[in-house]
Image (cartoon, coloured by chain):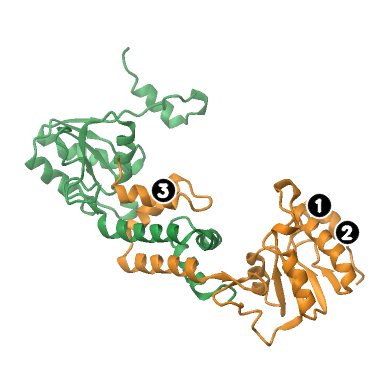
Chain colours: A green, B orange
Amino acid sequence: MPYPESMVRLIEELAKFPGVGSKTAERFAFYILGVSPETVEILSELLLKVNENIRYCHECYNLSEKEVCHICSDPTRDHGLLCVVQDPKDVISIEKAGDYKGIYHVLMGALSPLEGIGPKDIKIKELFERLKKTAIRELILGTSSDTEGDATSVYLLKHLKPLKIRVTRIAHGVPVGSALEFVDKATISRAFRQRQEV
Amino acid sequence: MPYPESMVRLIEELAKFPGVGSKTAERFAFYILGVSPETVEILSELLLKVNENIRYCHECYNLSEKEVCHICSDPTRDHGLLCVVQDPKDVISIEKAGDYKGIYHVLMGALSPLEGIGPKDIKIKELFERLKKTAIRELILGTSSDTEGDATSVYLLKHLKPLKIRVTRIAHGVPVGSALEFVDKATISRAFRQRQEV
């Protein structure tokens, strides 16, 4: 065994991180070896804290340290406007943009028949239960623009029709700041199909 | 603040890992969020243990959980054969190959005038003190084959001459299993210059 035992075990644990192989895990372990005891203590505590305390919001399935997240419990937000997204990370991205003032519903995935992910595997039932309880004026479909995201949108749209809620889909097109020459064909096609009057 | 506070702080800490940016740190934090409490406890303990317990061997500067590493304290190894390397990782690589049965001296770096690393900044003084105390039959220069590694070898060779110890350098040439077409020019030149009788 070339490394001391605790080093070997740390490398094994770090190699479980997403996208990290044994070489990268070795580099991380050497980093840990070299930092101050305070830094490691802080890291060690935060790991435990995040794993123990961060839960999914009971309302919207966004990340939260409390039972109901800071967005759902914020009275200044528009609770009649609901954006449906696939992942807590999507909430972060929209919040970083800073314009949206409504609330969210995180599906925790997208429909994917190929991977065996059906409507029961993501938070669709919870969405419809929420729509029964709460008066939503407009529902924005904010799922991804890939096959799974589109399939999820189509499925939701079909089941939302009878509820007579206004349903919109976020716009897809050429990213702001992109030169057309660097934009893929599918995006350009969509940007043309969904062109708007100016 | 889009993420809960402990999550933000964990992402900040994880982004200090070598080669990890904020996006990767986010992915790591989501991984931590999803694993079992036992996994996080083990990881957290190992981080503290490695940072606290792993030291550099007082003899050779290899990694060790004790004052003297398992190689220096192994009586079955050849203590008359000393291989000088730059980094504890080099010891690991040589040990993995499994042939070498001598001991090591880790310089903890290489000479690099451009980066201001001189003989006093690496464990060269310690090497010569060790050579005074211990009877070394052969010293193998195992530094890297780049500018810094070669400069370190040349420097050591010059100062080793008066000691009348047999000094060798590990062979450089075409890697075993490589087709010549994929080997760089510098390696091929060296392989030709240092060709051996068969």
The disc numbered 2 marks a residue on which chain?
Answer: B
Across the whole image, how many numbered discs are drawn on residues? 3
Residue that label 1 marks = B186
Q: Residue furthest top?
A: A198
Residue that label 3 marks = B12
* Label 3: element kind: helix
2 or 1: tag closer to the N-terminus: 1
Quadrant location, the N terminus of chain B: top left
1 or 3: tag closer to the N-terminus: 3
Can residue A112 be seen in the rendering of this structure? no
The numbered disc on residue A188 is none
Residue A82: quadrant of the picture: top left
The numbered disc on residue B192 is 2
Q: Could you confirm whether marks 2 and 1 are on the same chain?
A: yes
* Label 1: element kind: helix
Can residue B125 be seen in the rendering of this structure? yes
- Residue A176: x and y in percent read 41, 25
Identify which amino acid the numbered label 2 is placed on.
Phe
Identify which amino acid the numbered label 3 is placed on.
Glu
The disc numbered 1 marks a residue on which chain?
Answer: B
